[in-house]
Image (spheres, rainbow, N blue to C red):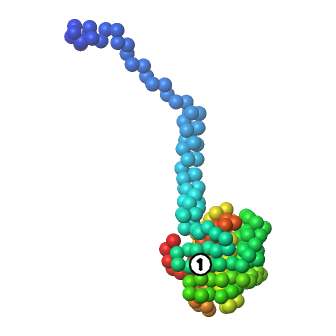
Amino acid sequence: MWSDDEEELLDGVEDDEEPPVWSSTTRFIVAVILAAVMASYVYLFPTLFDALLGWTQSDTLIGNTVTSGNITVSFTEAVQEDLQGLYGEFPEEETALCLYGWRENATYYVNDVTRPTVYSSSYSHVRHAPCPPTTLIVFHTHPQRQCLPSGTDRESLRDVQERNDDTIMLIMCAPSEFTVVHDPDAAI
């Protein structure tokens, strides 16, 4: 079947061995690992992505002031201590406050705080009595650096702005990190 020259070339070359067949146990383990990787992508990636995006959109408290674009929010020292104390008191769930003060152009000066009645609170939601129409800033916390406003947050701000269009929302997502939401329909 082979010519003499081909036989000479093939002389000393061993036949290829069949590759080992993976055992069913090995295939099962590989399948479980792949399924875990895919599940983590589906369930973990959006959360990580939102956290990273929120972190890039949030602003750092410098002194007693947060500046976001053309909007500045300035707190009295007592108010700042209240906000940071509240965040420390409820590190694993959202909570809400109503902030009062006055506005001069695009600067919001906050000198008073009240806590509305909170009906329920969890890691991703707080349900509370509405802040009064005189509220300058509707404030709430987002635990664990989740800085982006949710659809519910935007809808709540829209409702408040129907009564007072000067009202903005401030989300505290770390002891010194805030997201200012002034237009509930703007993309972040």
Residue 47: percent from the left, percent from the top? 59, 60
Does residue 17 appear anywhere in the picture? yes
The residue closer to the viewer here, 176 or 90, is: 176
- Lateral position of residue 19 relative to residue 128, left or right: left
Q: Provide the residue designation for mark 1.
A: 72
For the point 26% across and 8% down, the residue is: 8
Is 145 placed above or below 134 here?
above
Is 106 placed above or below 80 here?
below
- Lateral position of residue 8 relative to residue 50, left or right: left
Within-10-Å neighbours for mark 1: few <14, some 14–19, many 20+: some
Q: Secondary structure at mark 1?
A: strand
Does residue 128 appear anywhere in the picture? no
**Quarter of the figure with residue 148:** bottom right
**Quarter of the figure with residue 17:** top left
Residue 73: percent from the left, percent from the top? 62, 78
For the point 60% across and 72% down, the residue is: 179
The residue closer to the viewer here, 182 or 33, is: 182
Count the labels in the image.
1
For the point 54% across and 44% down, the residue is: 34
Is 97 placed above or below 88 here?
below
Q: Amino acid at mark 1?
A: Thr
The residue closer to the viewer here, 79 or 162, is: 79
Residue 48: percent from the left, percent from the top? 58, 58
Please identify the quadrant where the N terminus is shown: top left
**Quarter of the figure with residue 31:** top right
For the point 64% across and 63% down, the residue is: 145
Residue 109: percent from the left, percent from the top? 66, 83
